[in-house]
Amino acid sequence: MKKRLRGFTLIELLVVIAIIAILIALLLPAVQQAREAARRTQCKNNLKQIGLALHNYHDIYGAFPPARVRTYGSGIQSWNTSNVSWGARILAQIDGAPLFNQINWDQAKGNSTASGHNANPDGAMRQRLAAFRCPSDAENGAGKSFDLPDGSGVVRGAAANGNYGHTNYVANLGNYARLQPQNNNGRISRFDGMMSEVSKVRIRDVTDGTSNTLLCSEVRIGFPHRRSNPSESGPNTSLGRIFTCPQNGNREGNSFRQTGNSWFYGERPNSVVFTTHVGPNSRLYDCGSNTDRAMFAARSAHVGGVQCTLADGSVRFASENIDLGVWKFLGSRHDGESLGEW
């Protein structure tokens, strides 16, 4: 009599498959969390290196770099190249000296299509540098889904221009929503952050203390914003007047104007600075339609807030639930407020 070989029944196989599926479902979030923790750590390290580079730059030149240097006529001087950003100026301090030496500092316009070190296919502005990218963020904003600030749903991000190396890291403009530090009476500075157009902030100018003042933070590449300028209202306070974004109008669709478009070229403020009028990961729209007006929040792909470098070079995580008054005080270098824990 032949001995029957015993195998698995269909029900037994289905049970085993179901158990494996349950285990995968339980383990997958833990794996994803571990990967995000590693990405967040890398992002923190990027911001730490940027902080050290900015301090090294300060030691060499006696001040932190300007967010951009914009020239308005002929006779371009070295280091006065139109709209080249602070990111380009610290390349030598983040092991990017060969690329730094390629930059044509006399070229009149950072996005020029003329021949030159900045615009050619191997030029600086086209280079994609890991030092300026948060690994938690996707490549360029195209296809990414963002919660609409008004809570009405989600919207796809617009792609930043592919001719540029993009950036997730921007400098603190503070509580004045204009990049040009001037008013109708002339070039009277109102900016109270750490970097602006043609600024030269020194450590001794940070009278609130370097541990109480933001230096840099994060943005989401391609985050949608309104194509309109912020309006200024209310009485002057120690943090200036109140700026608000119109919550209507068209979203910006021009690829050159997307948030985080370029670490090299600072014509558009949302490639080089953030403001502290609104908190991290704000539910309000960003806005700005020209090369001067800037009301762009710090934003990140990390859950719950953003990472930021302080003026002392340390890196901290700022919760998106941080008190807005505290966030504004952190944005100003000289408001007279000494902050405790936040």
Image (spheres, rainbow, N blue to C red):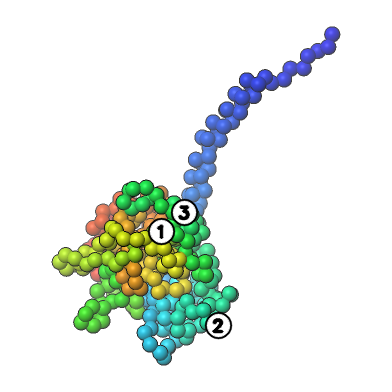
Q: Secondary structure at mark 1?
A: loop
Callout 1–callout 3 Cβ contact below 8 Å: no
Which residue carries the number 2 mark? 115
Q: Locate residue 5 relative to residue 285 in the image: left or right.
A: right
**Residue 62 percent coordinates (x, y):** 37, 80
In the rendered view, tell whether residue 47 sits above or below residue 305: below
Foreground residue among 111 and 190: 111
Q: Position of residue 233 (x, y in %)?
A: 19, 65
- Res 171 visible: no
Label 2 crowding class (10 Å Cα cut-off): few <14, some 14-19, many 20+?
Answer: few
Gap between marks 2 and 3 measured at Cα: 34 Å
- Circle 1/circle 2 CB separation < 8 Å: no
Q: Disc 1 marks which amino acid?
A: Phe
Q: Quadrant of residue 181?
A: bottom left
The residue under label 3 is 144
* Relative to 239, 258 lies left or right: right
Choose the circle earlier in sequence order: 2 or 3. Answer: 2
Q: Residue at x 39, y 59 (%)?
A: 224
Please state which of residues 16 and 194 is positioned toward the viewer in this rendering.
Answer: 16
Q: Give the residue furthest to the front.
A: 250
Distance of mark 1 from mark 2, alpha carbons?
A: 31 Å
Q: Earlier in the sequence, mark 1 or mark 2?
A: 2
Q: Position of residue 218 (x, y in %)?
A: 40, 60
- The residue beneath circle 1 is 223
- Residue 309, placed above or below residue 56: above
The correct choice, above or below, for 182 with respect to 298 in the image is: below
Q: Residue furthest right?
A: 1
Residue at the spot x=69%, y=21% of the render? 8
